[in-house]
């Protein structure tokens, strides 16, 4: 087993700060890669860092060779990609391994298998999961996209092969819209992930988005950490996540969790991964994809189980077997998270970069409230990247208690100088539709936009 002493963090913002916290606890020295735009980020203060390049992602956080070179030159034996950017890039994972740097994530071959979709979906079907109709792997162009869409019926959804966070997704309702949507999705995918490959699925409207958190070691042991409901979304970007998914019956939950574990084992997965499903209007859970990385909403599962997923990732990558069994996992109470973005929800969620003039969290030291952030008073939110500035997570004995605690926490959060999505979150949490669990992915409950 490998003992990592120095770990390169190939990401920025909240996830970089999150990874560093676990490194500190494990006695691992984090080394940060950064762009010009992030030179003054608070989480870099007193830390080792390497300038990767200018603000443009393609010249910094997406510059594979430059990042690996920086990891080698700073004597880092491991690298954590976080989420987004190169987190699910098999070429990047291979490049790390070729230069003696352990990639904290699944092996490149596993990512390639998931990326090709066909073997991954076959494994899911063999494990008893139902699939969403769509293309057989990545598309080879607009004409093939039209052919597949005509075969399965409109509307359809174009999706970025290396995507996440709603980037590189476009809804297509008729054949005449396909070319513009394809070009737009491909362009965004290249800009965000340096990968223009797309695939296509039947668009399920009015569904609920359910995902399962999984951990797998190198010795074929797989456990789940329960499911999350991520149905509060805007333009395919998740806004609120919670666990458990109360829309599921106990039998549906038990069967799907067991099938997810079987499928994860069948594809030879290693590391932390998330299997995503859509619960359609007929009540069928249909497999969408498996994300081969840490998810933004991972703290929800951590709050219910007490398992540090970043620690698990690091220990698994070092060759350590999982130190707990499925029977050891206790899924306690209810946890809920909201993502605070530097956006103005009253103006169509327009980006709101700028200087935070006051940042204050008057949370009274509540042990059941967690705040993950990289910002502070005086921090300047750059306009170049994702606008996430903070996540607030609350735990309660039941859903109502967790929602009440989260509401109180949000009301105590003071952020002056920029607009944030806090008003929208408070509106959702107080809405009758959300509290009574009567909503789906089509609209944000309690918010007109």
Image: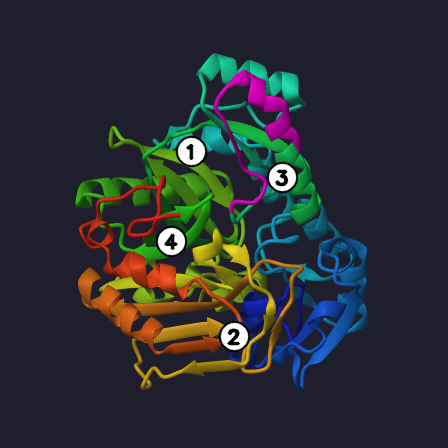
Q: Secondary structure at mark 2?
A: helix
On residue 22, which mark appears?
2
Left or right: 199 as drawn, with respect to 258: right
Left or right: 271 as drawn, with respect to 192: left
- Residues at discs 3 and 2 in contact (Cβ within 8 Å): no
Bounds of the magenta span? 166-183
Residue at image mark 3: 112
Residue 386 falls inside the magenta stretch: no
> Closer to the N terminus: mark 1 or mark 4?
1
Query: What percent of the width, then of the height, locates residue 422?
Result: 40, 65
Residue 329 appearing in the image? no
> Closer to the N terminus: mark 4 or mark 3?
3
Residue at position x 47%, y 31% in the image: 121
Left or right: 222 as drawn, with respect to 305: right
**Front in this rendered view, residue 287 or 236:** 236
Q: Secondary structure at mark 3?
A: helix
- C-alpha separation, residue under disc 1 versus residue under disc 4: 16 Å
Is residue 387 shown above or below 166?
A: below
Residue at position x 72%, y 71% in the image: 76
Residue 273 appearing in the image? yes
- C-alpha separation, residue under disc 2 versus residue under disc 4: 21 Å
> Closer to the N terminus: mark 3 or mark 1?
3
On residue 206, which mark appears?
none
Quarter-wise, where is residue 114 in the image?
top right
**Quadrant location of the N terminus?**
bottom right
Query: How many neighbours does mark 1 have within 10 angstroms: few (below 14), some (14-19), or many (20 or more)?
Result: many
On residue 223, which mark appears?
4
Residue at image mark 1: 124
Quarter-wise, where is residue 177 in the image?
top right
> Closer to the N terminus: mark 3 or mark 2?
2
């Amino acid at each position: 087993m490998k003992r990592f002493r120095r770990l390169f963090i190939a990401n920025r913002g909240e996830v970089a700060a999150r990874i560093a916290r676990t490194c500190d606890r494990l006695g691992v020295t984090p080394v940060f890669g950064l762009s010009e735009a992030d030179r003054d980020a608070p989480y870099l203060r007193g830390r080792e860092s390497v300038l990767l390049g200018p603000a443009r992602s393609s010249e910094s956080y997406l510059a594979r060779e430059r990042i690996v070179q920086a990891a080698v030159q700073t004597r880092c034996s491991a690298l954590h990609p976080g989420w987004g950017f190169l987190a699910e890039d098999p070429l990047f994972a291979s490049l790390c391994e070729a230069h003696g740097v352990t990639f904290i994530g699944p092996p490149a071959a596993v990512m390639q298998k998931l990326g090709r979709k066909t073997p991954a979906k076959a494994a899911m079907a063999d494990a008893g999961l139902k699939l969403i109709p769509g293309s057989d792997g990545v598309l080879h162009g607009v004409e093939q996209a039209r052919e597949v869409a005509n075969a399965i019926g409109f509307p359809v959804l174009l999706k970025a092969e290396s995507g996440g966070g709603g980037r590189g997704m476009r809804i297509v309702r008729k054949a005449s819209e396909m070319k513009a949507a394809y070009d737009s999705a491909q362009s965004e995918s290249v800009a965000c992930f340096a990968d223009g490959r797309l695939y296509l699925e039947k668009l399920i409207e009015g569904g609920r988005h359910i995902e399962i958190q999984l951990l797998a070691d190198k010795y074929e042991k797989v456990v789940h950490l329960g499911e999350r409901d991520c149905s509060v979304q805007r333009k395919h970007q998740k806004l609120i996540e919670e666990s458990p998914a109360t829309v599921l019956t106990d039998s549906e939950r038990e069967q799907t969790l067991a099938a997810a574990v079987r499928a994860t084992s069948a594809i030879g997965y290693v590391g932390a991964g998330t299997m995503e499903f859509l619960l359609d209007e007929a009540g069928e859970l249909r497999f969408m994809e498996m994300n081969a990385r840490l998810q933004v909403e991972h703290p929800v599962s951590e709050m219910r189980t007490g398992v540090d997923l970043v620690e698990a990732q690091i220990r698994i990558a070092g060759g350590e077997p999982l130190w707990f069994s499925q029977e050891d996992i206790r899924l306690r109470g209810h946890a809920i998270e909201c993502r605070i973005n530097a956006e103005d929800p009253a103006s169509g969620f327009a980006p709101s970069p700028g200087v935070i003039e006051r940042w204050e969290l008057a949370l009274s030291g509540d042990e059941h409230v967690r705040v993950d952030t990289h910002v502070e008073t005086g921090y300047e939110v750059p306009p170049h990247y994702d606008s996430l500035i903070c996540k607030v997570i609350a735990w309660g004995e039941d859903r109502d208690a967790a929602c009440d605690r989260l509401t109180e926490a949000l009301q105590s959060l003071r952020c002056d100088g920029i607009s944030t999505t806090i008003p929208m979150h408070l509106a959702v949490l107080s809405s009758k539709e959300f509290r009574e669990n009567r909503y789906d992915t089509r609209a944000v409950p309690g918010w007109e936009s």
